[in-house]
Amino acid sequence: MIISLSKDNIQVVKEQDVVLLRNRVKEVAVKIKMGLVNQTKLITAASELLRNMLRYGGGGFCLIEIVSKGRDNGVRLTFNDKGPGIADLSLAMKDGYSTGRSLGLGLPGAKRLVNEFDLKSKVGEGTTVMILKWANG
Amino acid sequence: MDKIPILRMGNFLLVTIQVDLYDRLALNLEADLVQMVSKTNARGVLIDISAVSIVDSFMGRIIGNIASMSKIMDAETVVVGMQPAVAITLIELGLPLKGVHTALNVERGMDLLKSMIGTTEEESEAEEYDDYLAE
């Protein structure tokens, strides 16, 4: 059972918001005493997903939560956009696949960097990505 | 608009990234650097990322691009000072930065650049030209 201890919803519409959001994620990660390597992994994953949200989803919201399960604390980020959605989820999760001119590492790379990853998308309605990193994960 | 300064030191260009990069800033740096290589006839580019705490796939791609672009402009690129956590993250992300020379710190980076270029700063332009012909 995962309990949410704090919530913070931030709107992301332009590139500079990414820097702001990375700092907010860093703050909460430090608050729950997450190690530097895990912090870096979490923020890098967040950075990938934020870019996707801006580039493909036209911006959206990021919900930052401190969550707890038993004795473990973690940071959960939920990215929500109202963009065109992803038609083929398994293709989007494949390394090296990109509809833009990028490396195609964003989604699969982000998944490798966190403990839990959940991607939901509906064509024409938008995309929601949830990632969770435990402090000692 | 933020801008990352590029310093010239002899045959080399030095870039120290001290701010949090967002995409536009990184793209501008890429364009500025390649133009500076051409303008100053630089033979080497040293990029210090010791103050950078996050390198994601976009930033990694820019670093790779800078190295490849400099290479076809006849300049070598060395990236120095990567934080251990950043190195761990890059590999897990799936971005091993192949084709980019790296060194632990600025000093070793400079040595690497000098050895790659194979000339000392004292050499005259004429000698460099000879080297160029001999290649």
Image: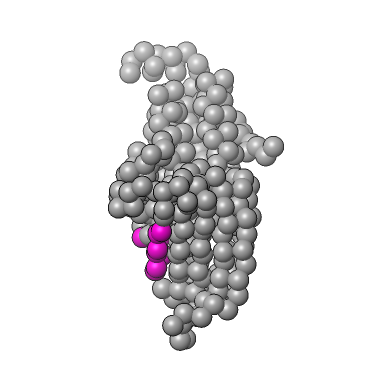
Name the residue rendered at 45%, 69% in the picture. Answer: A133
B89, above or below B19, in the image: below
Residue A118 belongs to the span the image colors magenta = yes
- Between residue A73 and residue A65, name the one nearer to us: A65
Q: Position of residue B27 (x, y in %)?
A: 54, 35
Q: Position of residue B131 (x, y in %)?
A: 38, 18
Q: The N terminus of chain B lies in which quarter of the figure?
A: top right
B62, above or below A25, in the image: above
Would residue A85 appear left or right of A59 to someone viewing this image? left
Name the residue rendered at 57%, 66% in the picture. Answer: A64
Q: Residue furthest front?
A: A124
Residue A124 visible in this rendered orientation of the protein: yes
Q: The C terminus of chain B lies in which quarter of the figure?
A: top left
A116, above or below B41, in the image: below
Name the residue rendered at 45%, 86% in the picture. Answer: A70
Q: How many marks can you see?
A: 0
Residue B33 belongs to the span the image colors magenta = no
**Part of the protein shown in magenta:** A112-120
- Between residue B118 and residue A57, name the one nearer to us: A57
A30, above or below A124, in the image: below
